[in-house]
Structure formats: structure tokens, C-alpha cells
Image: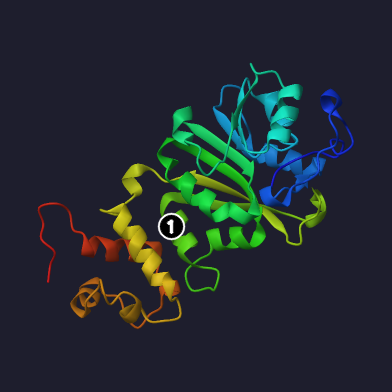
Amino acid sequence: MTEGNPTEGSTKPGGMKPHVARKRFGQNFLVSPGIVAKIVAAIHPQRNDTLVEIGPGLGALTEPLLVQLDHLHVVEIDRDLIARLRARFPPDRLTIHEGDALKFDFASLGSGLRVVGNLPYNISTPILFHLAASAGGVRDMHFMLQREVVERMVAAPGGSEYGRLSVMLQYRFEMERLFLVPPGAFNPAPKVESAVVRMTPRPQEALAAVDASLFAEVVKTAFSQRRKMLRNTLRERVGEEDWVKLEIDPRRRAEELTVGDYVRIANCLSPPPGRPKEG
């Protein structure tokens, strides 16, 4: 999903025809000035921030962000929208990275990066995992997403919304749902509510998993059959003696464990170098 503003559907920058939203890119343009103002206020950009916007679309967020920034980076895949952005904003203020955000190297923009965007709902989860890989150089992220996805991101253990996405993102980020956005704030209007979320990377010293890849694999396996007991879903990795040592009831299900529980399981399977696995 990308952004626009109330007038851009009828204006023709540089003599261009009005842009028609493209379903294959998940385009629904933000047309509510009030919501735009709330998002910018939540971001609270400072003049010298290194900020990148994913999917600027018709520039609903781009323009007010540039009022408060010296320079802005954007990642856009739609060539028609890129042409409009180039016609509207000078290159000394706006750097356009043409291509797929799923393949963009966010780390190339340096450290202290701030990331914002109205993420395409059809690829929101892959983008979030892609961004998590660059979290070490990120200061914060502000995204508008489908409300259902945000609820899963911030969910606590024990509920149906709590899953792999919850665990993986909560391990890497502190997250806060800021406010809801109704379908009428977009054109065309989606069939679902949206929500804005703030994601702040946790400090490196707080990331306790000895082997991040193993941690991710344990979480993925546990939730692959979330209604089954952990004794069954993780039987190829975790033995009965391990459950005793971890003090975790193997009859519990994946959604009942905390992020810390998953870290302990992974670390039990991958102890620090030089220390043999107990049992």
C-alpha cells in the first residue's frame, strides 16, 4: 500500500495523466490530511535525520516530511510514480531508490536510519522480516499496516494472534501500536482497518540468543503446527531431559511460550562455544 493526497488524483504534474492505483503493487493512496499529520507527528522528524520512506506513492507523507528534513530517501518500484516524484521534488532534497523494497539494502544508507512507510499489505510480513535483518543500523521504524497484522506483531502469549511473527519481531524490537486508521482514509478504500505501529530495535546486548538462526528455526518449527503440543512439534530437537532442565511443560503449545522461553530453548540446543551440551 502506498500513499497519496486528496488532490493528487486529479492533478497532473508535468502534464501527466492521473495515476490509477495498481493492485499488483497493493496501492491504496492515503488521502486523509488528518491521518498524515498524526503519522508525521508520531515520527517527529528532525532536520538532519537519515530517513527512508518505503513506497512514497504520490507523496502524501513525502511532502510534509521534507518540510522538516534536509533530505529524504525513498524506495519505490512503480516507474510511473517515480516519474511523478522526480517531476515534483528536486534531487538535492529527494533521493529515489528505484526497485523492490524486499531487495533493497537498507544498511547501505548508514547507521541511525529511520524507516517509515505505508507498507503494501500483500507483502508486509516478508518486508518486516527483511527489515529485521538490518535492525542493527536502525534507530526506529514507523509503519502503517493492516490492523490484523499489527495485532499479531504486538500480541502477548496465550492469544490466537500470538505467533511466529510476534515472537521474531518482539525479540528484535520494542513495539507499540499507536493508532487505528479507517478504510475511508484511503483511495481506493481497502476492505480492512489499518493501524500505525512504532518499532524500536532492542540493544544488541539484550539479544540473548546464542545462535540467531537456530532461534528462528525453533520458533518456525514450533508454530508450524501450533495446535500440537511442543513435545510433538519439537521432538526432533528437544528431548524429555531438555524439557526438565528448561522447566517447561512439553504439553504446552507454541502460543503459550514467551519470547524468553524460545530463547532458552534455542540456547539449550546451542550452548556457548567451549561448553558441551548438557545431558
Percent coordinates x, y for residue 248 in the rendering:
30, 75
209 relative to 113, above or below:
below
Percent coordinates x, y for residue 261 in the rendering:
34, 66
221 relative to 2, above or below:
below
Q: Is residue 113 visible?
A: yes
- Residue nearest the observer in this picture, 35 or 232: 232
Which residue position holds label 1? 168
The residue at the point 56 percent across, 26 percent down is 49
Percent coordinates x, y for residue 115 in the rendering:
56, 38
**Element assignment for label 1:** helix
- Residue type marked 1: Met
Residue 233, quarter of the rendered image: bottom left
- Residue nearest the observer in this picture, 266 or 46: 266
**Crowding at mark 1 (Cα within 10 Å: few <14, some 14-19, many 20+):** many
The residue at the point 54 percent across, 55 percent down is 125
Residue 215, quarter of the rendered image: bottom left
The residue at the point 71 percent across, 24 percent down is 86
